[in-house]
Amino acid sequence: MNLQISHLRNLYLSGALTPTNLVKQLDAEIGTEDTHHIWIRRLRLEELLDYAKALEGKDIASFPLYGIPFAIKDNIDLVDIPTTAGCPEYAYTPTKSASVVQKLIDAGAIPIGKTNLDQFATGLVGTRSPYGACKNSINPEYISGGSSAGSAVAVALGMTSFSLGTDTAGSGRIPAAFNNLIGYKPSLGLLSTSGVVPACRTLDCVSIFSNSPDDAAVVLQSAQGFDIEDAYSRQIPVNVMPNLGPNFTFGVPRPEQLAFFDNPETPILFKQAIENLEKIGGKAIEIDFSPFLETAQLLYEGPWVAERYAAIREFFDSRPEAIFPVTRQIIGNANKFNAADTYTAFYKLKSLQRKAEMVWNEVDVIITPTAGTIYTIAEVEENPIQTNTNLGYYTNFMNLLDLTAVAVPTGFQSNSLGFGITLCAPAFSDEALLNLANRLSLQP
């Protein structure tokens, strides 16, 4: 099925499709087998029909996401459906949906199910789950990327029009690159995290996967909004959205600051992406990327890992055996840090933030590979920590520096696996970045 939002909307408006027909067709096409380990809990047909029938007979024009199917990462609440965060022993059944999920349902979207993830959203690989390693949509021997693994693969395999993930260290961007999708990581606080199991609460974002920047922009319009119940929710400041017009400047890390981890093809694909940006009016400017790389190292090598422990402290202490071994090892590192270490790290972060700010005097946007390479599931299982670290090279700094980002597919390797770049800019550049991503996506 063609699940592009504009296509489905035209079918609904013409009367050629109803939400009931859509969910019946989707349910049959998805079937009962889950060879890619996408779903933790897919809604049953009768549950889907409840959502579909609630829309029928209503004014389609009043619902911007009327009958649009979407998937939800299983650390985000959907009313009456268990939330596991990738850990069955942790599961609870929420009595209301997360704020962002409710906004989407109110706009007419239909939830299809809850998706697999790296447990407690800790990982960029998609393999750290007792529900099975989520498999890449193009080649199942390779990782899907994580932690929003199933959310990406559900969209890539045509099971939903879009999906929700979360992004703390790259979880909404890495899976997009590996499955040939748009991965939009909003500005911190733009989408509410009420009803989301925290990873690092001060850094968490709800992210969006889609097949096009336009679809992500449509979803954003319904999903965003200040939430008084979320202490980290932020109002959009007046007149801060930049306008990336026909001519813009984009920063590229110095050659010695780029890392492709022995992949012979991705450097060439990155060079081609730069050339495509130049074709649509961009001017490349070499920048010193070191403040961004130093910031990235803080996320897992510094005390922010203790924030992951704080999020599940009671469960971690009482049920350590229930936690996936690699996840337990990572979060267990929290006991290496004390309060003084935390303040020292905050001082360092503040200094790095000041250095990084200077770059924005030179460029409008920074581009990097979303990931320098990709690994097979077997390679990750053999060396789970280092492979994950390599994948975070271009992503781990983003939320610590209060940036917004869009991962965009820009090519394929000879083995048919996708490659993409990430566009990033200061907070509240969301609309401008999605517009730029759309221009790049339309480039032949």
Image (tube, grey):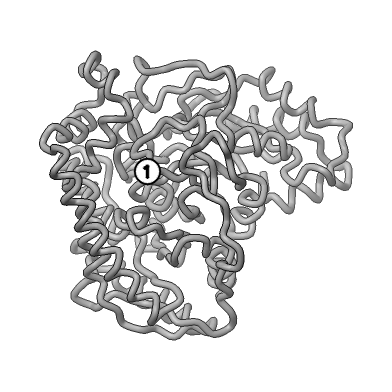
Q: SS for tag 1?
A: loop
Q: Nearer the viewer, residue 417 or 126?
A: 126
Asked if residue 404 is positioned above or below residue 197 in the image, the reply reads below
- Residue 210 screen position, x and y as percent: 56, 51
Instruction: Give me the residue at 39% from left, 70% from top.
Output: 367
Horizontal placement of 203 versus 62: left or right?
A: left
Hey, which quadrant is residue 361 in on the image?
bottom left
At horizontal 39% and vertical 83% (from top left) the residue drawn is 284
In the depicted view, which residue is nearer to us: 163 or 198?
198
Total number of numbered labels? 1
Task: Work out which quarter of the rendered image holds the C terminus and state it.
Answer: bottom right
Query: Between residues 287 and 348, which one lies in front from this camera angle?
Result: 348
Quadrant in the rendering for residue 306: top left
| Farthest-out residue, left | 336
Q: Quadrant of the N terminus?
A: top right
User: How busy is the neighbourhood of tag 1: few (under 14 within 10 Å), some, or many (20 plus)?
Assistant: some
Q: Quadrant of residue 396?
A: bottom left
Q: Amino acid at mark 1?
A: Thr
In the image, residue 293 above or below residue 287: above
In the figure, is residue 159 to the left or right of 33?
A: right
Query: At which x and y percent is residue 364?
Result: 45, 76
Q: Taking the image as drawn, is residue 410 in sight?
A: yes
Which of 139 and 259 lies nearest the eye of the viewer?
A: 259
Question: Which residue corresponds to mark 1?
Answer: 202
Residue 183 visible to the viewer: no
